[in-house]
Image: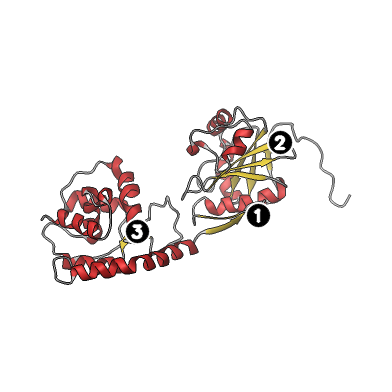
Amino acid sequence: MTRLDEAKHILAALGFDAARSNDRSGRTLLALARLTEGSLWADATNSRLGVRAILDWIREELDFPIAENTRETYRRQTLHQFRDAGLVILNEDDPSRATNSSLNNYKLTDAALTVLRAFGTPEFDDLVTRYLEDAPGLLVIYRAERNLTRIPVTLPGGVQLTLGAGGQNVLIKRMIDDFCEYFIPGGEVLYIGDADSKLMHFDETKLAELGVVVNTHGKLPDLVVYQPEKNWLFLMEAASSHGPVDAKRYGELSRLFAGSTAGLVYVSCFPDRAVMRRFLGGLAWETEAWCASDPTHMIHLNGDKFLGPHEASGS
């Protein structure tokens, strides 16, 4: 057998189905183990590699051409399954790293490496049996370690969720905890966009009752909250690095929620004023801006809607 055939054989022995022990998965395993056609399985290693490094290894060391647009296929249809089965560890160096970080990396577990190094020896079958017996327990440990890094969130109604660590989710938690408390009392969270799972929380039924039928979740804002008392629907974007409600996004959201029977309130949310200043010039009129660092205040880009004197403090 070629090294690729052997890699596929190992994956099948470890319980992976045909779709996860195909040529793509076999080459991915060889890249993770840093094995070429002339290498020995005893030489396998388990250094951390990002998706780009894995693809580059396959191109350069295995002499197999890979189009750049297949990167997501390798990540979603092979590496995610390897991770979910406990064959690899995602971000061992920083489990809290954001899902969309360019620094994300994968590493074969020590237990998997032991099996790989024994391929072709009399010990291989026994080690596979032992690995499969231990795998469920190891998987529980790996998942528990990942869950420790997740962000706990309690919705206004008391429902408890966890969001993936890092990225926009840190700001989304502040939006739920602080913005909703100060500005949307009695609000109902209808949608939370989480980088780990676009359907972390999605009340499709309630949105439909309000006249909003969404065919693609990718165009929804980061947070959608309904305030029954005023019949307002808050469309909120977390903008720590990108994605405030500028003119283009305002138009997209207006079309997406055109059927809403509730009044629409557009809010760009920032972690602090320094970040907000970078985007301020591009924010759309008739929207709101809010900073988590100053949670009790909001900026209204609404012309004369809120024009008027403020009472002096203490009067």
Which mark sits nearer the N-terminus, 1 or 3?
3
Residue at 66% across, 45% down:
188
Q: Are marks 3 and 2 in contact (CB under 8 Å)?
A: no
- Residue in front for this viewpoint, 35 or 161: 161
Residue at 45% across, 62% down:
146
For disc 1, the marked residue is: 158
Task: Give me the disc on residue 231.
Answer: 2
Mark 1: secondary structure:
loop
Q: Position of residue 224 (x, y in %)?
A: 60, 41
- Residue 160 visible in the snapshot: yes
Quarter location, residue 66: top left
User: Label 1 vs label 3: CA separation?
Assistant: 33 Å
For disc 3, the marked residue is: 85
Seen in the picture, residue 271 relative to 124 is either above or below; the reply is: above
User: Label 3 vs label 2: CA separation?
Assistant: 46 Å
Seen in the picture, residue 285 relative to 128 is either above or below; the reply is: above
Residue at 80% across, 36% down:
308
Position of residue 221 in the picture relative to residue 297 (left or right)? left
Q: Are marks 1 and 3 in contact (CB under 8 Å)?
A: no
Position of residue 260 in the picture relative to residue 20 (left or right)? right
The amino acid type found where label 3 is placed reads Ala
- Residue in front for this viewpoint, 52 or 163: 163
